[in-house]
Image (cartoon, rainbow, N blue to C red):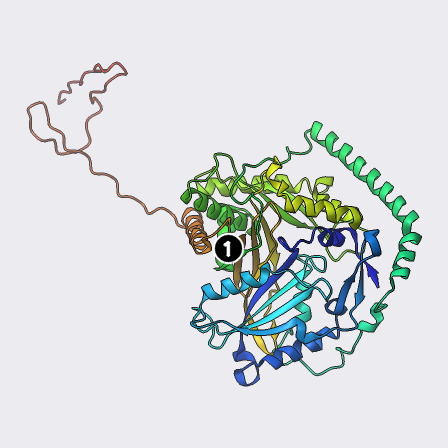
Amino acid sequence: MRQLGITDAAFINIENPTVPQQIGSLGIYDPSTAPGGFVRFKDVLRSFERRLLQNPVFRTRLVEVPFGLDRPYWVLDPNFDVEFHIRHIALPKPGDWRQLCIQVARLHSRALDMSRPLWECYIIEGLDNIPDLPRGSFAVYTKIHHSLVDGVGGQAFMAALHDLEPVPPATDEYAETYPRFGDLQPSDIRLLGMTLARLPERVAGTLKGGAAAARGIVQTARRLLRNELPPAQLNGPKTRFDQPAGHNRVFEGRLFGLEEFKALKNAAGVTINDIAVALVAGSMRKYLLAHNELPAESLLATMPVNMRTRGGDTEANNNKVGSMQASLHTNIADPRERVAAIKKSLDDGKLWIDTPLVSIMNIPGALPPLIAKPLWRNYVSNKLTRFLPLGQSTVITNIPGPPFPIYCAGAKLHCMYPLGLINPGLGLFHAVFSYGGNMSVSVLADREQMPDPEFYRSCLDAAWEELVEALLKMPEPQPAPAAPRRKSATGAADNGKPKPAAVRRKSASGRAASKPVRRTRSG
């Protein structure tokens, strides 16, 4: 039994059926690498089951403290059923990309069963009408509650479900280790007793954390006064994406070449992440322009920050993530200038990572569920996000994938699209993921705010071509214009040859500035 850390508890406290706090991924697999070139559902089930014995996180469920007096605990589920969590479906014919996107959006909009281990997996067949996929490919859509894993931690989740070769060696490394995790079913009396026993520790921790936050705010104010920090990028214009979100989602995705990404970043002298943000900025600019909704001011984006390499976190959190804000400079028409401005904005935003602003997400987790959950329910049901003065237009996350091929039941992962989550007042999420020589860009949005995801995909394509044109394609040299044929004083056509030094010029007043100098032939 293990208690949730503050950050993990925050995602539990803000869980809501309208905006479930789950992330996911859509992987597409090539079965030609599997033994016999074919993968059956029971092969995938067996592969997952073998892995589940090694990692207890898949078997843990949430246990709430009575009356919401303290953060909940993770315990092993004594009734765990792998077949409840792994399901087998197929797309209806013709089985094209649009149908796959609709199915994934539908699955991702459904909240998880909070009484069971907080993840589900769907094996999806019937993809043969999706272009550029190997014949017989199948998809695996996985969703998992954000309290169990963050974006970077999702790599560990991927590692738990994949092998490094099509046929892994038969070893005993997958022996059952999960019973060591702890108690299977703590009683309410025990949970209350533990809560009371922890009360002095919690009070001391709250006071200590409050004092540390106050010191951080004072230090941040001093740095601002000394011009050691750039102005915080907090106030963006309101858009259709900065509105209360509903129940329904749309999903879209696009693959780009990793080498092309690298060529763009080398040409601009920036990072791959800068190019990814510029691509999103360009597509949002084109989308809002097409709907006559582009604000004159720059849009603002939130970006998750990996805090694993930074100290100060003593809680046992699955999530070690903060957030920063940056301007997308969608008010700049020239893509080359926009890339340079985005780089500056991202560099400025990174300077705020060591300030209290980056950990604002911890506030709902610091409060006991007894207080945090009713406050959040009231916030969502009354759509109070409409009254917030700060405008955020999207979330953008960049997740590095493995630089080597991975396999599930012998089938090679062809490509992967991560899926984020929608917040009550922020209905657009972009996820960028690198794997197998490709960069995937995933788009998850509220269906009311983006009813036309296919058109948004075309905006992504247009923004990509715009970056390639601006950064990689040199303008073709234009031939020098021919000298105009002029008439002489006698009316004869001039032959266009260079004139002598004494050419008549006009001054600013329009009068002749000089007269031709009559030259005589000497000798």
What residue do we see at 73% from left, 53% from top?
Answer: 320
Q: Give the number of callouts.
A: 1
Question: Looking at the rendering, which quadrant does residue 409 occupy?
Answer: bottom right
What residue do we see at 71% from left, 43% from top?
Answer: 360
Q: Residue type at mark 1?
A: Phe
Mark 1 sits on what residue?
261
Residue 299: percent from left, percent from top: 53, 40
Q: Nearer the viewer, residue 227 or 22?
A: 22
What residue do we see at 44% from left, 56% from top?
Answer: 454
Residue 304 vs residue 486: left or right? Answer: right
Crowdedness of circle 1 by 10 Å Cα count: few (<14), some, many (20+)?
Answer: many
Residue 22 vs residue 337: left or right? Answer: right
Q: Is residue 496 above or below residue 367?
A: above
Indicate the quadrant containing the N terminus: top left, top right, bottom left or bottom right. bottom right
Indicate the quadrant containing the C terminus: top left, top right, bottom left or bottom right. top left
Q: Secondary structure at mark 1?
A: helix
